[in-house]
Image: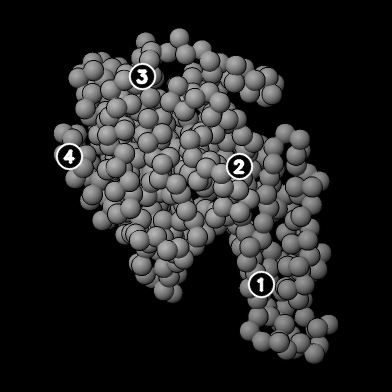
């Protein structure tokens, strides 16, 4: 089906509210009532951030809250993850809702009264720790959703599995973690999940708005390592060397032709970036080898295969032409699939988002080359992932502090909409299930 036609079809479906059961008034009232608690939880998590696979304090708070709501709770999932199961009073599907809990090795620069002062060791050096991507708000909002839905337990037409995930930002090389490990440990089984919903706060979208995309919404990602091996020599006699630095420079330049000459950019975007290069120890020694690290982003499985194949060919053949060798490792330490929103599910659930946000505030967006390991859940069951605006109203998205930066900031007025959106999706999906 033509993509532009599909997008138009989905947008036209937004006013069709009559096809979906109305969200009960008490849900809206409950979300209003719990807003202050969600903000309080978020501020606490923001002040006490923890890096991936180390979210022990956060997990303990989450588990205690879910247990207080009478749920069946499992801790230690994928190291520090928490899963709560709310069994409704009526038969129906199992809906999974996911929030990520980890912070980043970023030193906070803002003047918030609850700004992080946490320091820790990361990659052998002391770093600050900050919720610089909004995972603190995701956790707090899902805790709010859990309390709202627990208050409606007798009326629920099915069960809800609350997944509080560690290490979305990735694990250390060679260490499994995050959504991928949760899936391997069976988080989508017992009971078997029928559908999964998730959201991400977005600092460049105005609070009160929701954005989405059917199909490939966020890129799949692979990191890569390229090691070029040559022959060492004195810097004054370069003709005696096979210079891995010069070869690396040629490889980097040649890699730039992949997106511009091999990828059909009228269909999907792609990225090939070298972000790190290390070689040598002093000015007058041509070293024996050079190491490059980089990232690859793609929006389809086919494009991913194309990019990887071309990188391997270009790196190895460019090195060979110079008398050197190149070893290419893809992925080097991590791989996330494309965050792919199931087309039928997206079409079915858009009216639910429109009901809570207003149809005029639910916007179709282009794909994003950032990545999300929510995609591992979507590989197994139909999923819908969307963005929740977190930028103060009237701010300029071009100058608003972006994610993963020391000045990252989100407007807490957006949290109530996040609670209503996840709650509404859950109830409406249960109402529509046969």
User: Label 4, label 3: how many angstroms apart (C-alpha)?
Assistant: 26 Å
Q: Residue at x 79, y 47 (%)?
A: 260
Which of pointers 3 and 2 lies earlier in the amino acid sequence? 3
- Per the rendering, the mark at residue 23 is 3
Say whether marks 4 and 3 touch (CB < 8 Å): no
In the displayed structure, does residue 431 sit left or right of residue 338? left
How would you rate the neighbour count of disc 4 (Cα within 10 Å): few for under 14, some for 14-19, many for 20 or more? some
Which of pointers 1 and 3 lies earlier in the amino acid sequence? 3
Q: Which residue is mark 2?
A: 368
Q: Residue at x 21, y 39 (%)?
A: 66
User: Label 4, label 2: how many angstroms apart (C-alpha)?
Assistant: 37 Å
In the displayed structure, does residue 286 sit left or right of residue 389? right
Which percent across, then down, holds residue 269? Answer: 69, 41
* Foreground tag (4 vs 1): 4
- Per the rendering, the mark at residue 67 is 4
How would you rate the neighbour count of disc 1 (Cα within 10 Å): few for under 14, some for 14-19, many for 20 or more? many
Say whether marks 1 and 3 touch (CB < 8 Å): no
């Amino acid at each position: 089906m033509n993509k532009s036609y599909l997008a138009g079809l989905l947008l036209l479906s937004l006013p069709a509210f009559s096809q979906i059961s109305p969200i009960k008034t008490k849900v809206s009232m409950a979300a209003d009532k719990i807003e202050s608690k969600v903000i309080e939880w978020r501020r606490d998590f923001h002040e006490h951030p923890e890096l991936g696979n180390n979210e022990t304090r956060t997990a303990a708070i989450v588990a205690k809250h879910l247990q207080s709501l009478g749920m069946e709770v499992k801790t230690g999932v994928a190291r520090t993850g928490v899963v709560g199961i709310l069994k409704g009073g009526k038969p129906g599907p199992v809906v999974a809702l996911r929030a990520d809990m980890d912070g980043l090795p970023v030193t906070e620069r803002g003047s918030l009264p609850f700004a992080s002062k946490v320091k820790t060791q990361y990659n052998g050096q002391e770093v600050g720790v900050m919720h610089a991507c909004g995972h603190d708000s995701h956790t707090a909002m899902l805790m709010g959703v859990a309390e709202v839905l627990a208050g409606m337990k007798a009326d629920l037409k099915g069960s809800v599995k609350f997944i509080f995930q560690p290490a979305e930002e990735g694990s250390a090389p060679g260490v499994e973690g995050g959504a991928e490990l949760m899936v391997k440990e069976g988080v989508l089984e017992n009971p078997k999940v029928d559908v999964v919903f998730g959201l991400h706060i977005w600092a460049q979208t105005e609070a009160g708005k929701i954005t989405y995309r059917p199909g490939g919404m966020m890129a799949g990602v692979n990191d890569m390592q390229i090691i070029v091996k040559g022959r060492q020599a004195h810097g004054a006699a370069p003709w005696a060397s096979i210079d891995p630095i010069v070869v690396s420079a040629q490889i980097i330049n040649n890699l730039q032709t992949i997106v511009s000459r091999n990828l059909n950019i009228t269909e999907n975007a792609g990225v090939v970036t070298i972000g790190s290069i290390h070689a040598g120890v002093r000015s007058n020694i041509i070293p024996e080898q050079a190491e490059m690290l980089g990232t690859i982003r793609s929006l389809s499985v086919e494009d991913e295969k194309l990019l990887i194949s071309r990188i391997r060919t270009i790196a190895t053949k460019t090195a060979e032409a110079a008398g050197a060798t190149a070893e290419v490792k893809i992925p080097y330490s991590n791989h996330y699939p494309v965050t792919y929103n199931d087309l039928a599910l997206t079409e079915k659930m858009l009216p639910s988002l429109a009901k809570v946000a207003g149809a005029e505030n639910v916007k179709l967006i282009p794909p994003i080359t950032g990545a999300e390991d929510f995609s591992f859940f979507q590989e197994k069951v139909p999923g819908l992932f969307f963005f929740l605006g977190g930028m103060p109203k009237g701010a300029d998205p071009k100058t608003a502090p972006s994610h993963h930066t020391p000045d990252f900031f989100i407007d807490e007025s957006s949290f109530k909409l996040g609670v209503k959106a996840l709650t509404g999706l859950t109830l409406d999906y249960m109402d529509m299930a046969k």
